[in-house]
Image (cartoon, coloured by chain):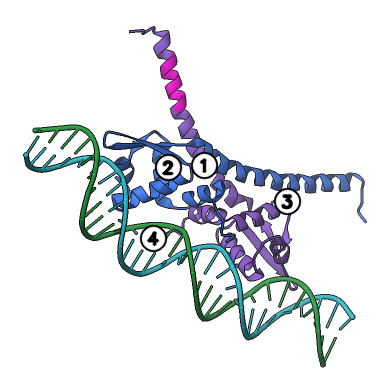
Chain colours: A purple, B blue, C cyan, D green
Amino acid sequence: MLQYDSQPLDKAFHALSDPGRRAMIERLSVGPASVSELAKPLPMTLSAVVQHLKVLEDAGLVKSGKVGRVRTCTLEIAAMAQAERWIADRKRFWEQQYDQLEAYLAQASSTGETE
Amino acid sequence: MLQYDSQPLDKAFHALSDPGRRAMIERLSVGPASVSELAKPLPMTLSAVVQHLKVLEDAGLVKSGKVGRVRTCTLEIAAMAQAERWIADRKRFWEQQYDQLEAYLAQASSTGETE
DNA sequence: ATCATACTGTAGCATCCACTTAAGTATTGT
DNA sequence: ACAATACTTAAGTGGATGCTACAGTATGAT
């Protein structure tokens, strides 16, 4: 690696690469939740969930705040959108390339070269 | 982890979390390239690049084939699109939630409760 | 035949990751 | 006051990752 991975996309994609963390995000995408609510369906200790939460927060994908003894977490769509955009941008390039091929083929056949 | 990460999204997002691998994909999104072409701009050995390429292929993001001594790599948009869709789906849920809040506020003010 | 090119494969190593256990702190309920 | 709840923090472990160095193999050029 380049040994300097503080770029947002590195962290975002890394955070999304874990099924447990994706499950947490799926839960949060339908509304805010406490840490224990996030933990309930997951086959791991609360401790592990808190660590995953840290990864998500560090990636900017989730924000949280504490009221009393309960920490409430919410999705941060902005970071999600940034990751989505990187992929969409690649797709755009790829499709452009595909269009160029089609344009070439169309032009080639209309100019009529069978030989 | 759940210790069973063969799911496609795990691999795709993991593959995308490395800047070197993203650089390779950025290069491939504008057209096919050989292994050494992919390696040229990257500050690492060819060996390392080949290993990154394996990760990308294992995630289904890239396909490659060899002609003579040259291996030519191409982007596989399908796996990219799948990753993009997972994010887009979460965003959709989040926006729906947001819309519900707006609808509630609109309804609340039109029914006229100042108390 | 010889040499360069374009990979390929393996071993080794330092670091990171996803957990767990265990011990703690701060709130809330009775 | 005492117990239960909701986290929080630290230490440790086994396995994965990202890299390099080095030793190949197969193909193309002269």
Between marks 4 and 2, how big is the CA–CA gap?
19 Å
Give amino acid for label 3.
Val
Q: Are marks 4 and 2 in contact (CB under 8 Å)?
A: no
- Picture coordinates of residue A97 (x, y %)? 43, 28
Between marks 4 and 3, how big is the CA–CA gap?
36 Å
User: Which comes sooner in the sequence, label 3 or label 1?
Assistant: 3
Marks 4/2 same chain: no
Q: Secondary structure at mark 4?
A: loop
Give amino acid for label 2.
Ile
| Depth order, front residue of C8/C16 | C8
Give amino acid for label 4.
Gln
Say which chain tag 4 marks: A
Circle 1 residue: A87
**Residue visible at 65% across and 43% down?**
B89
Circle 3 residue: A30
Between marks 2 and 1, how big is the CA–CA gap?
10 Å
Say which chain tag 3 marks: A
**Residue visible at 62% across and 54% down?**
A22
Circle 4 residue: A3
Bounds of the magenta span? A98-106
User: Which comes sooner in the sequence, label 4 or label 3?
Assistant: 4
| Depth order, front residue of D16/B42 | D16
Say which chain tag 2 marks: B
Between marks 3 and 1, how big is the CA–CA gap?
23 Å
Callout 3 environment at 10 Å: few (<14), some (14 to 19), or many (20+)?
Answer: some
